[in-house]
Amino acid sequence: MRLPLLLLSTLLTVLSCNPCNHGALAQGLELILPEGFKAFDTPNDSGETISLTWKVSPSESTDIDYIIYLSPSTDGPWQEAVRFRSDTHYKSDAPELFGFRKKLRNSHFLRIEPRRYFPGKENKKAVYYFKLAMARGEEVVPQGEVVSARAKGNWFDLSKLNNLIIMVSFSGIVLFFIAHARRFPHLFVRRISGLDAVDEALGRATEMGRPALFVHGLTGMGSISTMAAVNILGRIARKVAEYDTILKVVNNDPIVLSVSQEVVKESYLEAGRPDAYNQDNVVLVASEQFPYVVAVGGIMTRERTAANFFVGFFYAESLILAETGAATGAIQVAATDSYTQLPFFITTCDYTLMGEELYAASAYLSREPMLLGSLRAQDLGKAIIILVLFFGTILASFGIEFITQVFRAF
């Protein structure tokens, strides 16, 4: 009976001391230095950094660190540059250099800027020397091998080559469709009801003998929506000149005013009626938001405009302008890329161009090959992006991330 009790007691003693024995074994493990320690100039940079790589060591753990020593010469002095945990800093952390292969976690990688540790060393062609060591607490096991490298600048960042290829491809598509539009001027563009209504609105103003009103948004010429509005103004002014109708253009920015005057004057000249142009019909009414709204509302009420065009980027004044115009019984066409104001224009105007329809309007009205070709190329580019997103999502769901990496910008 005593023998089983003795065996049981011994077993319990071994099991209770087992974690302590494991800890002692872990502390007593010999640090095995890694192989393949290399230093090289970091590619695709401006010549500021040097990269270091080495293979994973079998003795790595969370309580073991790597230490990188740096020196400007083989004779020293050696300076501790970086110390980090041994289970961090892998090649997989730098896909712009090594790609996205799964085996990249078998090697460590570190990018270091030597001149940061030796600020007085201004020679950009200097060679720096590196040593690798492993440490467990105060215990440090240095590696005898010394590697060296010199940082050099690069002309091109090849990690962004995919961006260059995409840009060149899209530019080629744009040029192709511009050439195609020149050969086939009647290139199909989806009908936009608001632009088809321009002739109707101007015709009504002509029949009623009342002016048409063009209202710019509140942004300056640096805004793309204002540029698009100016293009549309030129087409409307040409129609007005042909119909012999009065067109009033209101602005709140002096630069936009000057541009609008020149655009309207040029349109009258193209229509063969330069004498009908009246500079007083293109005016600066106010430079502040709500004084501008009050002034424009007064013009609508006094002149009883038959057609109102609200084109550009608008803010809180949009509903006041559109409501005033609707109260006078005018046909109203709005075009804006301000999504916060679209609900007000949709409810108060007869026709509303939403978002990118504003940018497409100038191509739609003018039928110029350059604008038509650019518009068609943009539509094709959007279709390609939608397809890539769709198939990329499906492939990524199955762990295939090739398309994701092709469009990655490092």
Image (spheres, rainbow, N blue to C red):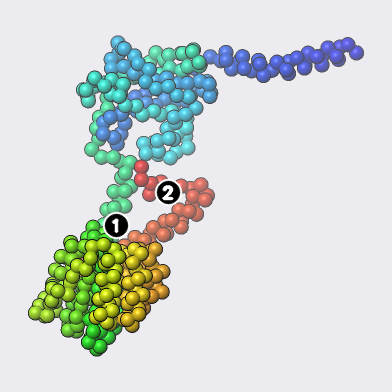
Figure quadrant of the N terminus:
top right
Nearer the observer, 198 or 171? 198
Name which residue type carries label 1.
Phe
Residue placed under numbered mark 1 in the picture = 170
**Residue 313: mark in rendering:** none
Question: Which element carries disc 1, helix, strand or loop?
Answer: helix
Q: Position of residue 71 (x, y in %)?
A: 31, 16
Q: On screen, 331 above or below 170?
A: below
Which mark is first along the chain, 1 or 2? 1
Q: Is residue 249 above or below residue 391?
A: below
What residue is drawn where x is 36% and y is 24%?
38
- In front of the other: 22 or 347: 347
Q: Are marks 2 and 1 in contact (CB under 8 Å)?
A: no
Q: Determine which residue is flagged by label 2.
A: 404
Residue at 46% from the left image edge and 47% from the top image edge? 401
Residue 149 in sight in this render = no
Give the quarter of the image for residue 386.
bottom left
For mark 2, give the secondary structure. Answer: helix
Residue type, label 2: Thr
User: Going by the picture, which residue comes out furthest to the right?
Assistant: 1
